[in-house]
Amino acid sequence: MASKVIHAFYDDDDVLMHAVKKVRAAKHHIEEVYCPFPVHGLDKAMGLAPTRLAITSFLYGCVGLVVAIVMMNYMMIEDWPQDIGGKPSFSFVENMPAFIPIMFELTVFFAAHLMVITFFLRSRLWPFKEAENPDVRTTDDHFAMEIEIHGNEQELRDLLLDTGAVEINITEK
Amino acid sequence: MYTFSNRLKIASFILMAVGVLGIGIGFMTAPSTVEDAKAMVASHYDGHGDAHVVTETHGGADQAAAHDDASHYEHVLLQLQNKPWAALYVAALFFMMIALGALAFYAIQRAAQAGWSPLLFRVMEGITAYLVPGGIIVFVILVLSVAQLNHLFIWTDPEVVAHDKLIQAKSGYLNGPFFLIRAAIFLGGWILYREYSRKLSLAQDESNDDSNFKLNFRISAGFLVFYLISESIMSWDWIMSVDPHWFSTLFGWYIFASMFVTGITAIAMVTIYLKSKGYLKDVNNSHIHDLAKFMFGISIFWAYLWFSQFLLIWYANIPEEVTYFVTRIADYKVPFLGMLVLNFVFPLLLLMNSDFKRINWFVVMTGIVILVGHYMNIYVAIMPGTVGDQWSIGMSEIASVLFFTGLFIFVVFRALTKAPLQPKRNPFIEESKHFHY
């Protein structure tokens, strides 16, 4: 279904932050803000729900830890018990100090990589994906705020110009 | 201006009084003859049937078992006589290190010209005020050790050194006078910086330019160089040398991590206390969040250093090095492994969530766990070399902690009343007021 959206362009992140707060105070729903770089605090100003990425990261870290424990136990204790430097073998607990670096590394590895992959999936980003930016300038030095129009075009236009928008476009989406 | 509430003052006096009483009883009930020591050990084993089994199983590793019965009990007697001294020394050292860790944190904030922390400077200065009495007490204990009034450091005993080739080789460094000279230089340097920086900090409030602030920046940078070297040597002298045969090259860092995290924890807890009483109005939860991040990070840093030290020694398994951990795992299993849980696992899990770092009671609870854990850290560092397997958390240990808690509270909060809690003319004070994450 095609709907009309208004794109307001800003050329400063501080102005943008104030504009977002003003638009929200005027009870308009902001669809999306396109930025050339992450703007600190923008998610809170837009009223986005807090990210749950940290929780997934913690869980991935736990998976990594378990994988490391199971792997080291299988390789070094069960399948082919290693005897390095006269250390006691056949016991995971007694050999554990030697496994802690691996447990740590795999925890970090799983947490970091799976979190990034989750982030890409959740943001619907994959190789060769067409850019969603409404305007190439949002990858350079402009910020664009997208608001859906429900027959209140003039009112929105006035409000956005008032917040310091440098350009306002109306497009079909 | 902060006023020292009567309730807190009375509480600190009660803690000190109870502490002095307990410490006194601890010294009085220490055995004076071999017969007393025998009776104490026997009644101890009756009370805890399993303790006997433990001593028997590790008997092979214990030097004392090689001797005949009489010399064994003489050894036990010395260990039991050492116990109240060691308990006093552990608590004195622990609280002095809180103040010293807070001083290092303060100097880093000054040298980095941090914008978030100036609101907390008076709290840090209050905590570092304890360095003067705390440092003097530690110094007195060291003097008494060198004077042979106790046997905390066996290398101070000429009789022991005469029969010990390894200590003889180290005696150019490890001898009484040089040991005390080093201690005096270190404590003198730390206290000098603390007092001078405090003076400049107060003068900055009344001045009409930033010259005091700039001078404070320079002396803080200089102090950090001095601190890093002196702290490292301090940890060898005052802690590592209770086991004079053993050495570890990262011991200084390891002890630094311990004092740094306890110092930051003390800053966070005093700040939260003052805020709960309606002071420090401009300190917001972002400041608490930052302190809690440091508590979280330095706890992990401590665990990293602890493990770095342990892994290499465990892996190499060289007898002269590994005895340190063998005795600790054999005789001190619960405090030795328990402190890893308190100092690493608890802070890691409790403070991992970003939101939890802003909840005051959460930070205080974790802070208490960290303080208990790092007391255990110092305890496990000192006790095996001074009392061997004759340790217990009894009258002397608890009373010593109570006494120094009382003294710490009294000195710190009295220092806080001396100046307004909010610096007036610090150039970064506005940034600190508006600090938000």
Image: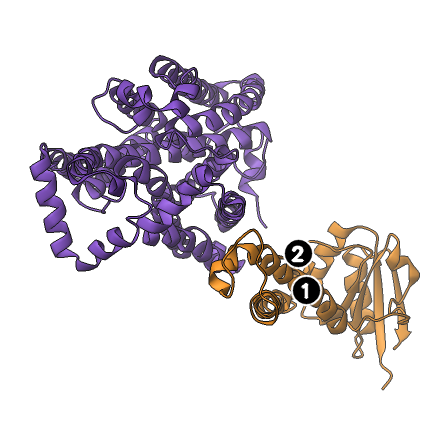
Chain colours: A orange, B purple
Q: Residue at x 38, y 32 (%)?
A: B239
Q: Quadrant of the N terminus of chain B?
A: top left
Q: Which chain carries label 1?
A: A
Mark seen at residue A19: none
Element class at badge 1 = helix
Residue B253 percent location from the top left of the image: 51, 35
C-alpha distance separating marks 1 and 2: 9 Å
What chain does badge 2 belong to? A
Whether residue B201 is visible here, answered yes or no, is yes
Regarding residue B272, the answer to whether it shows in the image is no
Circle 1 residue: A46
User: Which image quarter: residue A148?
Assistant: bottom right
Residue type at mark 2: give it.
Gly
Query: Where residue B37 sits: x, y (%)?
Result: 12, 39
Specify which label sits upstream in the sequence, 1 or 2.
2
Left or right of A39 in this view: B126: left
What kind of residue is marked 1?
Met
